[in-house]
Image (tube, helix red, strand yellow):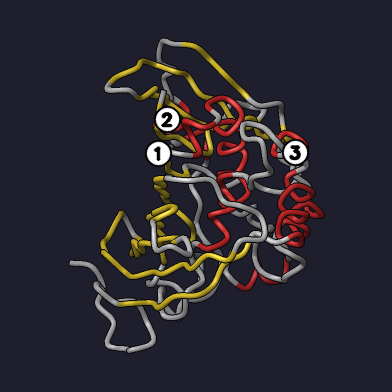
Amino acid sequence: MAYVSNDPEEARIGKDLGSRDFVADEGLLHDYFEGLEIDADWYSGNPYEATVAPSMTVTAVDGGFAGGGFKNSFGNLWMRQAWELNAPIVPGQQYTASSKVVDIYDHRNRTLVNSEVVLWSPEGEKMAVGHHHQSYLLSQSSGKVALRDPKAKGGARRFAVPAGDLVESDPHPISLEMCGTFFHGNANYHTDKRAAEELGFEEVVVGGRMTMSYVGDLMDKHFGKGWFEGGKMDIKFTNIVWPDDVVTAKAVITDETDGRANAAVWMEKEDGTVVIVGTASAKV
């Protein structure tokens, strides 16, 4: 049975985490594009006759709600993320994000919290719905996090590429400086080695928001409106990305059913280690 906390400041199933405002303002978009080192010009007039924000700017509203996790954050890692997109985000427009804890469950030696976040338009329409699965190593509070060798992690290394049309991004080197820019200069275990060591990691852990955003950028540019207005993605983070790794986002368009194009998506390092694996689809 999953861990149940009696602390009112920690996560529990059904807990309402409240709401907050969200704006994809100039500062956020600058740090997004500069932190990822991707082309911002594409989002000005393409695929719309107006500037839109990258779809994965929704990750900025995900997580971080007070009381949505556990106080023992030693060794915590993002394990899974799902998104359903209904409309593009307009830069400068104010939206509202609300969140709640929908499940807490065990997986191997970790306790996972599944939090739902909804981004609402000013008219009260659902712009996007996300499910964030954050894992906690509650049995440990000091020392080093034991990580499996990616080369010995059979499921990730034996990833079978399905038949279909391959699309892929350019290779993306990720530097520590890029991590700092993407996370707005905040010191945390995604940007600062000392903060990472306090949580049991020997190096900075590149944030899942960054790696997932490369997958989102690939989907934005391949599917266009069909993605912004009806994209779905469900991914798992299978291995950690470290600063100085080079990653490439890939997808195979497998088929079309019920007015949707379906794809297998993944991301891999230069040595073939798979760091993200999942599925995606868009309207056609």
**Which image quadrant is residue 70 in?**
bottom left
* Alpha-carbon span between mark 1 and mark 3: 22 Å
Q: Name the amino acid, label 3.
A: Ile
Q: Label 1: state its secondary structure.
A: strand
Image disc number at residue 282? 2
Q: Label 3: state its secondary structure.
A: loop
Answer above or below: position of 46 versus 251: below
| Mark before the other along the chain sequence, 1 or 2 | 1
Residue drawn at point x = 54 percent, y = 54 percent: 58
* Alpha-carbon span between mark 2 and mark 3: 22 Å
* Alpha-carbon span between mark 1 and mark 2: 6 Å
Image disc number at residue 232? 1
Give x and y (percent) for residue 105: 26, 62
Crowdedness near tag 1: few (<14), some (14–19) or many (≥20) residues, C-alpha within 10 Å: many
Q: Label 2: state its secondary structure.
A: strand
Q: Name the residue that disc number 3 marks.
A: 38
Q: Name the amino acid, label 1.
A: Lys
1 and 2 marks in contact (CB < 8 Å): yes
